[in-house]
Structures are given as structure tokens and as C-alpha cells.
Amino acid sequence: MAVLCCIVILITVAGLLIFVLTWQIADLTQDVSNIQAQMKKFLAGVQKYINDHFGITPQVQNKIIEQQQSATTSTGSMGINVVAFIGGFLADLVLTLV
């Protein structure tokens, strides 16, 4: 009977954890367009500041950014690494609890 209670509690906690994560991700995806708009506004302000204080035009700034991005890891591979880390973490968590 005690084993059955532990299993039910484990499944309930795991279900609640999945529910909360899904809920938070759904809220985040709804806010993505607002976040993107705010980021574009912020970056435009930063570009204007750099242009006003350092004399580097937005076109030259974009070219510098493109050069730096090509030298670093791509966003796609970073996204895959994040997903793999989260998957591994959740698998380890479940295995540790069991």
C-alpha cells in the first residue's frame, strides 16, 4: 500500500510539474510578439545612441554584427543544445526520483 501511495504521489507531482511548465511556455509564446517589438525599439535606440556618440552608422553596425555572428556558433545549434540540456535534465530528474 505504501508503494502505491508513493507512485501516485510521484505521478501527481510529475503531472503538476509538466502542467506548470506547459502553462508558462504557453504564456511566453503569447508574449513573444510584444517582446520582439520591445527589443526592436530598444535596439533602434541603441543604434541611434551609437550613431550619435560614435559616428558609426546603423548600416556599418549591422555589418559588424553580421561579421561577429558568423564567427560564433549559430543560433540553431544553440537552440538544439538548450533543448538537449532540458531533456537530459528532466530525464535525470525522473530517474533520480524513481
Image (cartoon, rainbow, N blue to C red):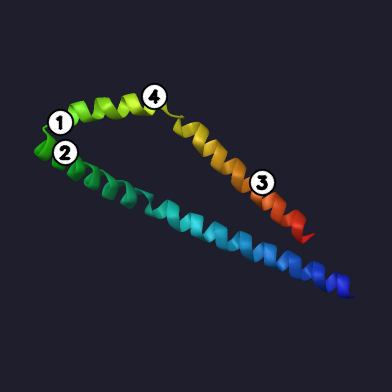
* Cα–Cα gap, marks 3 and 1: 44 Å
The kind of residue on which mark 4 rests is Ser
76 to 4, vertically: above or below = above
Tell me which residue sits at (55%, 57%) in the image: 22
The answer to whether 6 appears left or right of 24 in the picture is right
- Mark 4, Cα crowd under 10 Å, few <14 / some 14-19 / many 20+, is few
Residue under numbered circle 2? 50
Residue at left offset 19%, top offset 39%: 47
Q: Give yes or no for contact between labels 4 and 3 (Cβ–Cβ under 8 Å).
A: no
Mark 3 sits on what residue?
88
Identify residue type, mark 1: Ile
* Amino acid type, residue under disc 3 in the picture: Gly
Reading the chain from its start, which is encountered first: label 4 or label 3? 4
Extreme residue in the front direction: 54
Q: Residue under label 4, please give it.
A: 70
Marks 1,2: beta carbons within 8 A: yes
